Image: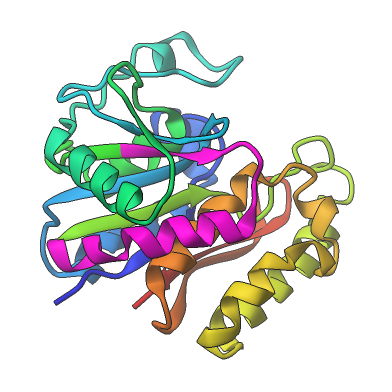
Amino acid sequence: MKLPVYFISHGGGPWPYIPAMQASNTALAASLADIPKQLGRTPKAILMVSAHWETQGTFAVMTSPHPAMLYDYYGFPEHTYQIQYPAAGSPELALRVQQLLSGAGLPIAADPERGFDHGAFVPAYVMYPQGNVPMVQLSIDAAYNPALHWELGSALAPLREEDILIIGSGLSYHNLRQIYGGGSEASAQFDAWLQQTVLHAPPEQRAALLASWESAPAARLAHPREDHLIPLMVAAGAAETDPATCVYHEAQAFAGITVSSFRFG
């Protein structure tokens, strides 16, 4: 039976490794920890499409069997720059991704040096704290074309039948400059549109609706730069016409913003 696909709001920085941040992210932690239970089995590997890896003109896939760590955050306690998430890579999965994308006419490059960024290892740690599931990262394209990323997801869809868990990791709201001033209202307006589009619109209309996301209420206030939204396009493309469920929703997260995560299938 094919696995579901997820778009997750991954939270801020290395939050599971900082006690004070853990305390304010209990609902997010519970939602991520519940994903393995929802699956009912351990997947062969995770393919993580993180908002924190952008490439220009071609997608890139991590090929190292033992990925390094990439501490792509600033101003956190010293110990968070010593984190080691022990999951292995999967050259086998990386090769399969290259085959699928090449077969779909999408540009794809191998990256043997890329390490796990926090959009990948943070949620993976909460889901599988022992790092017992291999993980491969796939980049997003820096042009942020929704249709291109939907096409990317569609090309990856066969992996769901191959026991690969596809996760788009971003945030349903990502405007750090406004998070403490106006973020609450903007995130609520945009999240309401997301809920309607992802959960209630006919699945066959998702591609067109998500492609026109900029016309949603408070769209550019919620995502002045849509890097954290684009992984949703990938997840929805891989989901095809499967129904969606909201698996995480908070109206007072972080600085009082509304955030959500979704499962397809």
Residue appearing at x 45%, y 79% in the figure: 244
User: Residue 211 appears at what percent x and percent y?
Assistant: 67, 66
Residue appearing at x 76%, y 59% in the figure: 187
Residue extending furthest right? 181
Residue 17 placement, left or right of 13: left
Residue appearing at x 65%, y 69% in the figure: 210
On the image, which quarter does residue 157 sit in?
A: bottom left
Q: Is residue 92 above or below residue 79?
A: below
User: Residue 207 appears at what percent x and percent y?
Assistant: 58, 73
In this orientation, does residue 6 appear? no
User: Residue 60 appears at what percent x and percent y?
Assistant: 40, 33
Question: Is residue 92 or residue 26 the one in the foreground?
Answer: 92
Quadrant of the rendering where the N terminus is positioned: bottom left
In this orientation, does residue 142 appear? yes
Number of marks in the rendered image = 0
Residue 88 placement, left or right of 101: left
Asked whether 140 falls inside the magenta stretch, the response is yes
